[in-house]
Image (cartoon, rainbow, N blue to C red):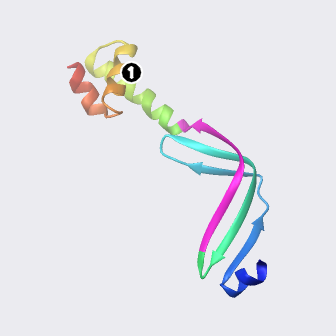
């Protein structure tokens, strides 16, 4: 199989990794104890990853949402729960949340 892959211009290399983190806007995907293979096919590099997958909220997103809630509470003079609900209904759009409570 390796010989056929080599003839086709495909090479594979195992990468020794402890953890892989995929950062998204709202959360991070974490792969612990990963098996990572780097595949080079005619100059195009791709990675194949498998392992123990978990997700965690992105701290920046949490902090940003907390700040938005405080801003809404100050601008509209409402309770925290009302501000959270308005922000959720507005899909995280601060301006829309403030206008909906005004």
Is 22 left, or right, of 53 in this rendering? left
User: Residue 54 colored magenta?
Assistant: yes
Quarter that holds the N terminus: bottom right
Q: Position of residue 26 (x, y in %)?
A: 49, 40
Report the residue at 31% width, 13% height from top: 78
Q: Quadrant of the C terminus?
A: top left
Please give the name of the residue rendered at 77% of the width and 83% of the height, measured from the top-left corner.
3
Residue appearing at x 45%, y 27% in the figure = 66
Residue 43 shown in magenta: no
* Front residue of this view, candidates 48 and 91: 48
Q: Is residue 41 above or below residue 21?
A: below
Which residue is identified by label 1?
84
Q: Examine the rendered structure and indicate whether residue 92 appears above or below residue 70.
A: below
Q: Main secondary structure of the magenta part?
A: strand
**What's drawn in magenta, residue-wise?**
45-59
- Front position in the image: 2 or 42: 2
Up/down of 46 relative to 52, above or below: below
The residue nearer to you, when weighing 42 against 99, is 42
State how many labels appear: 1
- In this view, the residue in front, 89 or 71, is 89
Task: List x then y, in percent, for residue 50.
Answer: 70, 53
Residue at disc 1, secondary structure = helix
Instruction: Please state the horizontal and vertical placement of residue 17, each as a whole percent of the image.
Output: 76, 57
């Amino acid at each position: 199989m390796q010989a056929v892959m080599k003839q086709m211009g495909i090479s594979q290399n195992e990468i020794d990794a402890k953890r892989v983190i995929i950062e998204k806007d709202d959360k991070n995907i974490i792969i612990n104890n990963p098996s990572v293979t780097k595949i080079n096919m005619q100059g195009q590099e791709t990675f194949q990853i498998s392992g123990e997958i978990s997700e965690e909220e992105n701290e920046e997103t949490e902090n940003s949402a907390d700040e938005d809630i405080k801003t809404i509470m100050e601008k509209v003079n409402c309770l925290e729960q009302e501000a959270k609900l308005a922000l959720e209904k507005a899909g995280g759009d601060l301006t829309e949340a403030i206008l909906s409570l005004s």
